[in-house]
Image (cartoon, rainbow, N blue to C red):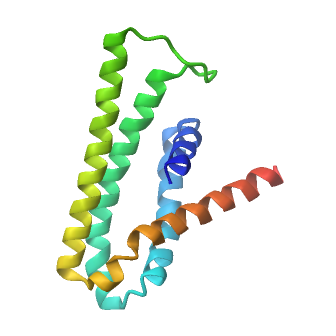
Amino acid sequence: MKRFLILLVLCSSLSISAQKRDRHEHIKALKVPFLTEELNLTPAEAEKFWPIYNVYDSKISDLRSRERKLFDEKFSESGSKKSFSDAQAKKLMAEYQDIEKSRYELETQLMIDLTQKLPASKMVFLPEAERKFGRKLWEEYKKRRDKN
């Protein structure tokens, strides 16, 4: 999953912000029915699930933006590694660790919030459903890239 996120970060950093918003909305429009079906959510469950998940998704999107910024700080436009002093490198590493810690805390809180309102027997499959969606998205990207 991390490889997918890194590739997604790389791809998304190359486009302009309007395209990013459109792409994010398009991906979200694909994700809603996919996760709803994968988790076998009833309409009543979906009504409870999506507001909680959307808050989480927004916060995760903010973390991805921080991660992209961090990536941009480490590499030049050509993709070559920048040189850092020990202090600069430690600062970047601390920022990355903070992002990872925040991601873990968000994922933990998401599962707590969801299982308070929805069956744990369905929510236990959310991480795998998200991975499946990511793989599907990546496969579609590769197909389109290969056509061009």
**What residue appears at the point 64 percent right and 21 percent down from the top-left corner?**
78
Residue with the most extreme top position: 85
Q: Position of residue 95 (x, y in %)?
A: 30, 30
**What residue appears at the point 20 percent right and 69 percent down from the top-left corner?**
112
Relative height, residue 113 to residue 90 (above, below): below
**What residue appears at the point 81 percent right and 49 percent down from the top-left corner?**
148
103 relative position to 6: left or right: left
Q: Position of residue 87 (x, y in %)?
A: 31, 12
Residue with the most extreme left position: 116
The one nearer the camera, 44 or 35, is 35
Q: Position of residue 138 (x, y in %)?
A: 62, 57
Number of numbered labels in the structure image: 0
Relative height, residue 146 to residue 136 (above, below): above
**What residue appears at the point 21 percent right and 62 percent down from the top-left corner?**
109
Q: Position of residue 85 (x, y in %)?
A: 38, 8
The one nearer the camera, 81 or 33, is 81
The one nearer the camera, 135 or 34, is 135
Relative height, residue 61 to residue 74 (above, below): below
73 relative position to 97: left or right: right
Relative height, residue 74 to residue 55 (above, below): above
2 relative position to 53: left or right: right
Residue 69, quarter of the rendered image: top left
